[in-house]
Image (tube, helix red, strand yellow):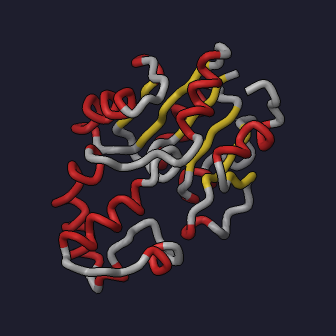
């Protein structure tokens, strides 16, 4: 089978990692209970930042957010490695900026995810992911962003949404824990 995965907030807990960095950089102590209720992908509002300030904060800390000690979601590496070990094709499709593609691929490998260079797609806009997903004829695709997931409505690809506070309104198969992935796809061997 062919499996496609977004990286940020699907395989790794990037927003939460960034939230902790923002707390440290802004000398704040805003709790995770607040983080868990943020209704947008953007995380700047609880810090009192305007959209412009939030965008600038993200840009200013992007490398630190992307390439430090951001944890993967529990079980994600194990699931992907088991799929790869069984001979399934694993594709990564991320809209991280083009300038970070090589560094992102190296970082994902260093974290222990199974990466085949030719199956790593990076640097496209969210809405462009659909073209890649369709051209790859993926059997299963997992992402967190409603804007991406909604472009796949009606496709033959099984769409799974990685549960996040900002994607509660979408109605796709919902992954809340990587422990349940095999059950969600109806695959017991992994």
Kindly give the residue lying farthest to the bottom in the view shown.
Answer: 48
Q: Is residue 5 toward the left or the right of residue 171 in the image?
A: left
Residue at image point 43% right, 26% down: 120
Residue at image point 25% right, 62% down: 58
x, y percent for residue 64:
22, 52
Residue at image point 40% right, 46% down: 125
Tally of numbered tags: 0
Residue at image point 43% right, 40% down: 94
Q: Is residue 131 above or below residue 38?
A: above
Q: Which quadrant does the N terminus fall into?
A: top right
**Residue 13 lies in what quarter of the image?**
bottom left
Q: Which quadrant does the C terminus fall into?
A: top right
**Residue 44 lies in what quarter of the image?**
bottom left
x, y percent for residue 47:
30, 81
Q: Is residue 81 toward the left or the right of residue 25 in the image?
A: right
* Nearer to us in this view, 131 or 118: 118
x, y percent for residue 23:
27, 73
* Nearer to us in this view, 91 or 125: 91
Q: Is residue 46 toward the left or the right of residue 160 in the image?
A: left
Q: Is residue 3 above or below residue 183?
A: above
Q: Is residue 43 above or below residue 84?
A: below
x, y percent for residue 167:
60, 65
């Amino acid at each position: 089978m062919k499996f496609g995965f977004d990286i940020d907030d699907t395989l790794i807990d990037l927003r939460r990692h960034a939230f902790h960095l923002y707390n440290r950089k802004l000398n704040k102590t805003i709790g995770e209970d607040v983080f868990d209720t943020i209704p947008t992908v953007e995380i700047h509002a609880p810090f009192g930042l305007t959209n412009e300030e939030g965008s600038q904060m993200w840009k200013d800390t992007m490398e630190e957010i992307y390439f430090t000690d951001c944890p993967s979601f529990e079980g994600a590496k194990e699931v992907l490695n088991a799929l790869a070990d069984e001979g399934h094709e694993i594709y990564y499709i991320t809209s991280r900026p083009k300038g970070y593609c090589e560094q992102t691929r190296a970082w994902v490998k260093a974290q222990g995810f199974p990466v085949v260079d030719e199956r790593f797609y990076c640097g496209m806009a969210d809405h462009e992911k659909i073209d890649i997903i369709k051209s790859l004829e993926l059997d299963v695709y997992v992402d967190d962003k409603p804007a991406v997931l909604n472009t796949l409505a009606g496709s033959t690809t099984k769409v799974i949404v990685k549960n996040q506070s900002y994607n509660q309104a979408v109605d796709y198969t919902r992954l809340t824990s990587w422990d349940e992935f095999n059950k969600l796809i109806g695959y017991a061997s992994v």
